[in-house]
Amino acid sequence: MDSDICRDMSTTNITFIADLDVTRDDLSIKVRGVNHWKQMSFYNKNEIWSIELILVNEQILFNEQGSKIQASVPEKFLYRLKNVLKDGMSYYITSPILMLAR
């Protein structure tokens, strides 16, 4: 298996969603996907442009309130992730690219 995926995460500092900082690129988050959907291409309705996800801190239960973020998996990464992304699953993400909401 890929060593990046299987490494020991117990020594890594996890940042909570509420504490994310767009000026940093060295963050790690552990989140759960609560909803995901395919965003189809504007030009070709049969082509997936991206997969969009709503993520919460992993320890938040489904009926609790907590910080949420929207994440996008662009088309160039779909081949690696489209069969892995499922609602209710937890994900460990290192060095995410962050942007402020428009």
Image (tube, rainbow, N blue to C red):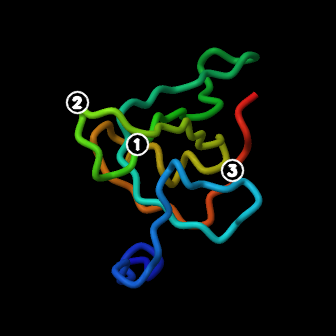
Q: Which residue is mark 2?
A: 63
| Spot occupied by residue 4 in the image (x, y as percentages of width and height) | 47, 77
Label 2 element class = loop
Q: Along the line of sight, which residue is nearer the eye, 14 or 44?
A: 14
Residue ID at (22%, 30%): 63
Q: Quadrant of the N terminus?
A: bottom left
Label 3 element class = loop
C-alpha separation, residue under disc 2 versus residue under disc 3: 26 Å
| Spot occupied by residue 78 in the image (x, y as percentages of width and height) | 56, 45
> Which one is in front in this view, the residue at disc 2 or the one at disc 3?
2
Rendered image: mark on residue 27: none
Q: Which residue is mark 1?
A: 56
Query: Pointer 1 and pointer 2: residues touching (CB < 8 Å)?
Result: no
Number of residues whose C-alpha sits closer than 10 Å to that of mark 3, classed few (under 14), some (14–19) or many (20 or more): some
Number of residues whose C-alpha sits closer than 10 Å to that of mark 1, classed few (under 14), some (14–19) or many (20 or more): many
Whether residue 94 is situated above or below residue 49 in the rendered picture: below
C-alpha separation, residue under disc 1 versus residue under disc 3: 15 Å
Q: Quadrant of the C terminus?
A: top right
The image shows a total of numbered marks equal to: 3
Residue ID at (52%, 48%): 18
Query: In the rendered structure, which disc, 1 or 2, sits on the residue that comes first in sequence?
Result: 1
- Residue type at the position of mark 1: Val
Looking at the rendering, which quadrant does residue 48 occupy?
top right
Q: Which residue is mark 3?
A: 98
Q: Along the line of sight, which residue is nearer the eye, 63 or 38?
A: 63
Label 1 element class = strand
- Residue type at the position of mark 3: Leu
Whether residue 96 is situated above or below residue 38 in the rendered picture: below
Residue ID at (61%, 21%): 40
Query: In the rendered structure, which disc, 2 or 3, sits on the residue that comes first in sequence?
Result: 2
